[in-house]
Image: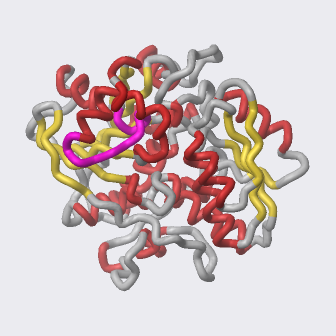
Amino acid sequence: MMEPLPGITRRQIDTSINSQWRYRAALPLPQGEPVTLGEGRTPLLQRTLAGLRVTIKTESMNPTGSFKDRGSSVMISTLRHQGVMQILEDSSGNGGSSVAAYCAAAGIDAQIIAPASASPSKIVQSRLHGADVDLVPGSRQDVADEAIRRAGTRFYASHNWHPQFLQGVKLIAYEIWEDLRFTAPSAVLVPACAGSLVLGCAMGFAELKRSGEIHQVPRILVSQPQQCCPLVRAFTSGAAAVDARTWPATLAEGTAIAQPVRDREVLQAIRDSNGAATVVAEDELLPAVRELAATGVYVEPTSAQVLPALRQFSATGHVSPNDTVVLVLTGSGLKAGQALSRLVAD
């Protein structure tokens, strides 16, 4: 993590830029042309879900179909400026396809390690961007472990480790703030794997508070699939870090890492915001995809879990009709076509 930054005011937004780079003044970056595909500026839509009027941030509208583009753009811009021309990345799919796209735009050679069980759509996307993709048997954690073993021979540009990736992700907070007419929501509900969205929201809104633009950081509400929920388990038990254990496979593959590398920081960020965390049963994932699709929004199971999580948070009093709640939908349903085809077959 980097030292806390002072944040920016609305007067420092470069409104001539229609991407997340309009908030460049909030980034600790050297001058130079960014590696950008037009990421950010994703729609904030009004919906009635779980009996509540909420807003949804459709990150599936980013260039490669997921929120990871926010971090990839800033991280790859930094690496290109530093002269790095070959990188190694590990991913369950979305991070890899995003890094592959930005490396292609930057002229950087990318090697992506992904689980053999990853969505074929994500792997095809990475390969078409020119990345060398190596599929590893086993879990998402096995993939992360393999990447660390290989990091001695190639620059390891892990989106879970690199601080500039988080600098890109934090810009979603600035965007939500601008979308809501320069106010902060009461709560932000995100699915969590390694926790970059949790940390990005915590960092971005904290900066806005330091700059005097908002008075209160939103509560950060987190969902994880019941079949892989190390952060929720640690949070609810009061632990400072996750415990080491093996988890079964889940359809929510984008939130399926057993040992997040920033677990202590993520757990502390949730607690500091007076947030909460909950698990979503496996049999709730596909119905949630269908329910969101019925409102015109097509997301993968990883993203859809926030809908049953919203119901739980409403039932437990963590959100109410008086709250302004933003649900972050992290990735497109087009990323999980094979898994979602069963919805049509059923």
Give the magenta-colored segment's residue range. 294-304
Q: Position of residue 25 (x, y in %)?
A: 47, 75
Let me know if residue 301 is in the magenta part.
yes
Residue at the image position 19 percent from the left and 33 percent from the top: 319
Q: Position of residue 275 (x, y in %)?
A: 33, 33
Q: Position of residue 234 (x, y in %)?
A: 49, 20
Let me know if residue 287 is in the magenta part.
no
Residue at the image position 32 percent from the left and 34 percent from the top: 289
Whether residue 156 is situated above or below residue 256 in the rendered picture: below
Left/right of residue 285 with respect to residue 79 in the rendered view:
left
- View extreme (right): residue: 153
Left/right of residue 47 with respect to residue 212 in the rendered view:
left
Whether residue 58 is situated above or below residue 306 in the rendered picture: below
- View extreme (front): residue: 345
Q: Is residue 265 visible?
A: no
Residue at the image position 41 percent from the left and 64 percent from the top: 40
Whether residue 202 is situated above or below residue 141 in the rendered picture: below
- Which is nearer the eye, 10 or 142? 142
Q: Which quadrant of the figure has residue 320?
A: top left
Residue at the image position 31 percent from the left and 79 percent from the top: 11
Q: Position of residue 36 (x, y in %)?
A: 54, 72
- Which is nearer the eye, 48 or 159? 48
Q: Quadrant of the C terminus?
A: top left
Name the dominant secondary structure of the magenta segment. loop
